[in-house]
Image: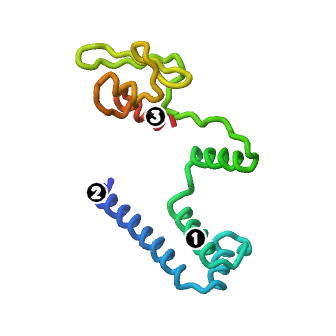
Amino acid sequence: MKKNARKSGAKATLTGQAAEVDVLAELAALKAMTVPELQSKWRVMFGEHAPNASRGNLELRIGYRIQELAHGGIKPATRRTLDALAAEVATGAPGPLIADPRRPIPGTKLVREWQGEEQVVTVLTEGFEWQGRRFKSLSAAVRAITGSHWNGWKFFGLAHGAEARS
């Protein structure tokens, strides 16, 4: 028989809070360490000798590693973006544009009723079109439709499109 779910949920929350306190305590302890102690901590955290003896660098990178191990690293999409930016810097050539994952493919018609009238915005390769007028952003097209500022993605119900696909 299952015990009180609320009790186990509370326990999980307390466990999470305790883990966060441990992370904060570890981060605070870094400030009190000497450079040789930081270098020793580096060997424990990374499995190799510290690349330099810069106290600030050691504190920052060890602190990041502590948080990374406790909370998880960066998301794969963020990693891809960073890798693309690093490649641009290394080669000096601009890389491909990283498209907004919410953006539908060109030619898509976005339809919404606004004040009793059907509004249709067409997605273009560069921008959007509404009633023969071109706009750089979906929000600008929606501003023309409504007369006030809206988040264009939310207006057409696309705000969570990237999350739904991932």
Q: Nearer the viewer, mark 1 or mark 3?
A: 1
Left or right of 85 in this view: 32: left
- Please tell me which residue is depicted at 53% across the width and 85% down the height of the picture: 32
Q: In the structure shown, which secondary structural element does the residue marked by tag 2 occupy?
A: helix
Left or right of 21 in this view: 105: right
Q: Quadrant of residue 65?
A: bottom right
Q: Considering depth in this image, is 23 or 122 the residue closer to the camera?
A: 122
Q: Is residue 111 above or below residue 137?
A: above
- Please tell me which residue is depicted at 63% across the width and 45% down the height of the picture: 80
Left or right of 24 in this view: 9: left
Cβ atoms at labels 1 and 3 below 8 Å apart: no
Q: Nearer the viewer, mark 3 or mark 2?
A: 3
Q: Which mark is residue 60?
A: 1
Q: In the structure shown, which secondary structural element does the residue marked by tag 3 occupy?
A: helix
Q: Amino acid at mark 3?
A: Ala
Q: Nearer the viewer, mark 2 or mark 1?
A: 1
Estimate how packed mark 1 is, as few (under 14), some (14 to 19) or many (20 or more) residues with alpha carbons within 10 Å. few
Q: Amino acid at mark 1?
A: Leu
- Distance from disc 2 to disc 1, alpha carbons, whole Å, reads 38 Å
Provide the residue designation for mark 2: 6
Q: Earlier in the sequence, mark 3 or mark 2?
A: 2
